[in-house]
Structures are given as structure tokens and as C-alpha cells.
Amino acid sequence: MLARAAGSGGLAPPLVRYVQRRNEDTAAREKHRLEDKLARLESKIAARNLWAGQHPRSKPEAGLRQLQGWVARHRLDKLVELQIELQEESNCLRMECKPAAIEQSLKLAGCYALTTDVTPEKLDAEQVHTSYMALEKVERGFRAIKTWLLEVRPIFVRKEERTRGHVFCCMLALKLAREIERRLCAAFGTTETNLDAITLPDALAALGRLCLLHWPVEGENIVTKLPLPDQSQQEILAAFGIHLPAM
């Protein structure tokens, strides 16, 4: 809501409120990524020094420029410094880390800010974040409807009531997909905490292998058999609370 500015006839801009949040999973992932980059840089420096030792006529400045380009591309130029270390027989490259800059970078890892014009009296910081996450789920739901999972388009019906029915069925399918994701997450966790966690596409692909087998017996008689699910399928069905009928 716009408020009238004090001492003027105009309107003051709405209040902008910033809510700072930190995602610990993202922070841990960024820390691991930084450690991996530093380890790769050390291995590159060691390989360059080994090559320079085998080629006495090589110039360390050329290797320094090459590695400085790699550091800049991976955004490490503010966190480390490459130097040429003078030795008796040859010159080697050396990496010197900047602990204060690295610590400051890790402090900001996983941090983000939400903006809102709602006052703290109406919504506290946690409620603002919950509303934001709910909006993210809505956007993700629209992507699921329009793209890989449900593919609401193209629509091959022409009458309005049939189009509404088609979209309504897609919305019901989205509700079912969300419930499946919730149960999979409760049983196996997420891919951020467990690399072997079963996702919705994994579950659909695994259950898609279950099919009825039909055997013709003595002319027109047909025996129908449902094969036993494998270990992965059994775990997924148990997470859903589904028991297959005996056949």
C-alpha cells in the first residue's frame, strides 16, 4: 500500500523489506566445489613444475600466464595468488591462498535475500520464506505441467468443456506427482543429502518395467501372471504403501 510522503503532496514509494536467508546445503556444496577447484589448481601447478623440470629452456612466465587464465575463468583470482618461486636450478610456480578472502567467500555461500513490502507485524521472516518457497513450488508445478512430465500441450480437443477436462486431469496428475515426490523424499531423502535417492523419474522408470504376462494355454485359455517386483521396485512400492495383488 502506498503511503503519503511527509511534507509533500506526492506518494512515497512502498516499503522494501529485505529478509536474509542461508541454505546450508548450498553452502556445503559451494565449500566442496571450492575445495575441489583448489585441489585441481594444485595438481595443475605440480604438473607444470614437473614439465618445466624436464624442459630447462621453458619459461615460467608462460606457465604463469596460462594458469592465471585458468584461475580467472574459475573465479579464484581473488582467493589465491600465483607466484614464481626462485630456486637454484629452476624457477617453479607456487600458489598462495588468501585465508581471509576464502573465509569471507564461504560466509556468503548459500546466502540470498528476499524482498517484500509486507511489514514484520503481518509476516515474520520465517513466514516470508515459507511464502517464497510456496511460490517456487507453484512455478515448478507449471513447468511440470507444460514440459517433461505431463505435457499438457498440444491439446487436440476443440470444445471448451473438453479442454477444461483435459487441463483438470493434468492438474490431478500434478497433485499425484507431488504426493509421490513427498513419499519418495520421506523414504529415501533428496539427491542433495543422498546421492542414491530415488527421484520421481527414477520411480516411474522402475515401475514402468512391471507388466502383466499372458500365456495362451490349450487353445483359447490364457493365463495371466504378474512377475515379482525386484528389490528397487519393492522399495518404491513400500514407500507408496502399495501391495500388489497375488496372481
Image: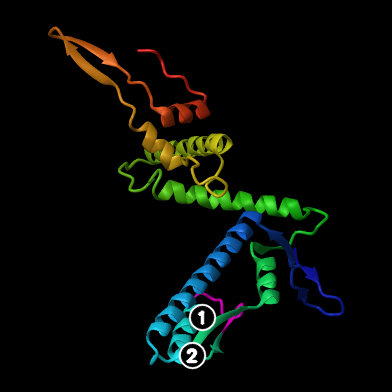
Mark 2 Cα-neighbour bin, 10 Å: few <14, some 14–19, many ≥20: few
Name the N-terminal-most of marks 1 and 2: 1
* Left or right: 8 as drawn, with respect to 46: right
Q: Amino acid at mark 1?
A: Ala
Who is closer to the viewer here, 75 or 3? 75
Q: Amino acid at mark 2?
A: Glu
Q: Residue 129 at what x, y percent from top left?
A: 69, 54
Judge whether 121 appears above or below 81 on screen.
above
Residue 81 magenta: yes
- Say which residue label 2 marks: 89
Looking at the rendering, the stretch of residues picked out in magenta corresponds to: 72-82
Q: Outermost residue toward the left?
A: 219
Image x and y of residue 27, in percent:
63, 60
Instruction: Tell me the quarter of the image containing the C terminus.
Output: top left
- Does 59 sit above or below residue 211? below
Q: Is residue 89 left or right of residue 222?
A: right
Q: Position of residue 245 (x, y in %)?
A: 41, 15
Q: Is residue 242 magenta?
A: no
Quadrant containing the N terminus is: bottom right
Q: Position of residue 75 (x, y in %)?
A: 54, 76
Which of the numbered marks, if any, corresponds to residue 72?
1
Q: Does the rendering let one see residue 164?
A: no
Residue name at image x 58 percent, y 53 percent: 136
SS for dot 1: helix
Q: Is residue 165 above or below residue 98?
A: above
**Residue closest to the eye, 240 or 123:** 240
